[in-house]
Amino acid sequence: MAHKIQDMYENRKARAELVFLKSNTSETTPLSGDKTEGRADIYGTFNELEKVKKKELNKWWECKSLNRYLEAEIIPRGLRIFIMPTYEDPHPDLLKEWAAHNALSSAGMMKILVKYAQIERDKAIEKIEDLEKTIDGFTDKKLADSLKTAMEERLAKIEEEITQKKACKFNRDTTDYQTGQIYTFAKKFDYWRRLKGNERSSGGMDIESRKSTDISESSDTDFEDTGRLKTHTSLQDEFDFFKERSQDQSQTMARNKQNKRKRQRKKRRGGKRSKCRRGREKDSQQQAVLTDEKTIINLTDVILEEEDIKNLSLGLSYCQPDGFEYEQSRIDLFLFTRKLKLSKIHSISKRKANRPSERLEF
């Protein structure tokens, strides 16, 4: 059992050397596993074994890649510390010393990740050994062998994908140090505007272009010629980039505060009017309703004159000079108001009567 695990690690180390020495890795053709039927405990055991082996595989590559970064004195993009001093014109030596401390902090975090990844990997190895002992006890050797073959093929495909990703990222990070873009690598992609969601309006690169750019710039990278942080001399450009970004962030924060105050004022006024509410207000402006216990009169088509306003102010108390008849008066008033059109309710129309410039025309 120990001999098999040792052989597996030797093969894996050879693949890692090809990755970090920038050699082309051979492509593996995944094969489809046989779908055989058998006892449920056999399938369950192999499924559990495959999950644990995937975890052990990921942790091994994580430890290997981080250790290789530490040996090369390179910080991956995801662990670089984007903190710079806020002085207007900092001293160049200050920038160099500041960047060195950032690099040391990132290296310390990488060592912590390696430590706990190794702990998780050791636990996975112990569980793998227990599961393999359980598999050795199965009586159906033919079924166990077929399941094992299919599992190994799937794991080989997963390892090939991990190998390609690690190689691409390592070459990309190496290029950052060679070109002096340790902290400004994203500036050419308009990175901070993309974080704000303005990529389309700002004319940023699309996803496929960014992917192809990363790969093309990393293709000619040689690990042996990698630049080190101590020889990096373009820190002033990086400081200018951070200064510009901090100004953009300050403007964004001020704009957000202003929008928040506007929302609060709208909320105190009753919030934003809905479409239904605006429609009801529009209808109420075009239609005035006088109500009585038995009568509802719609007023339309109006040019307000002094006599009309006087009659409207009387409301339903309007009657003919020859006497008062309730039903006849209601009909007469209804026919009279049919010729009128109010732009607002009756009270607003009364106030506008004294302002001829705002009266409605045919």
Image (cartoon, grey):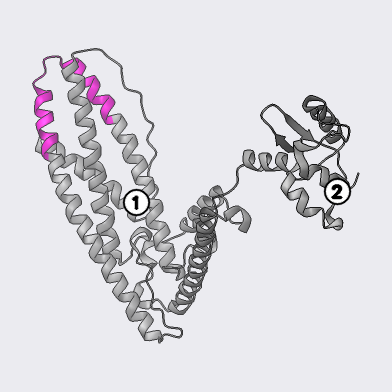
On whether residue 135 falls in the magenta region, the answer is yes
- Mark 2 neighbour density, 10 Å: few (under 14) some (14–19) many (20 or more): some
In percent of width and height, residue 299 lies at 79, 36
Numbered badge on residue 39? none
Residue 49 on the magenta segment: no
- Provide the residue span drawn in magenta: 126-152
Which residue is at a point 48% across and 53% down the rendered structure image?
215
Please, is residue 335 above or below residue 355 in the view? above
Q: Is residue 107 left or right of residue 89?
A: left
Residue that carries the numbered disc 1 in the rendered image: 19
Q: Amino acid at mark 1?
A: Val
Residue displayed at 30% across by 16% down:
35
Q: Whole-percent x and y of residue 328?
A: 82, 26
Q: Nearer the viewer, residue 100 or 249?
A: 249
- Looking at this view, is 286 or 325 the one in front? 325
Q: Which residue is mark 2?
A: 360
Q: Quadrant location of the N terminus?
A: top left
Q: Is residue 13 visible?
A: no
Left or right side of 250 for 322: right
State whether residue 134 is above or below residue 164. Answer: above
Relative side of 223 to 324, left or right: left
Residue type, mark 2 in image:
Leu
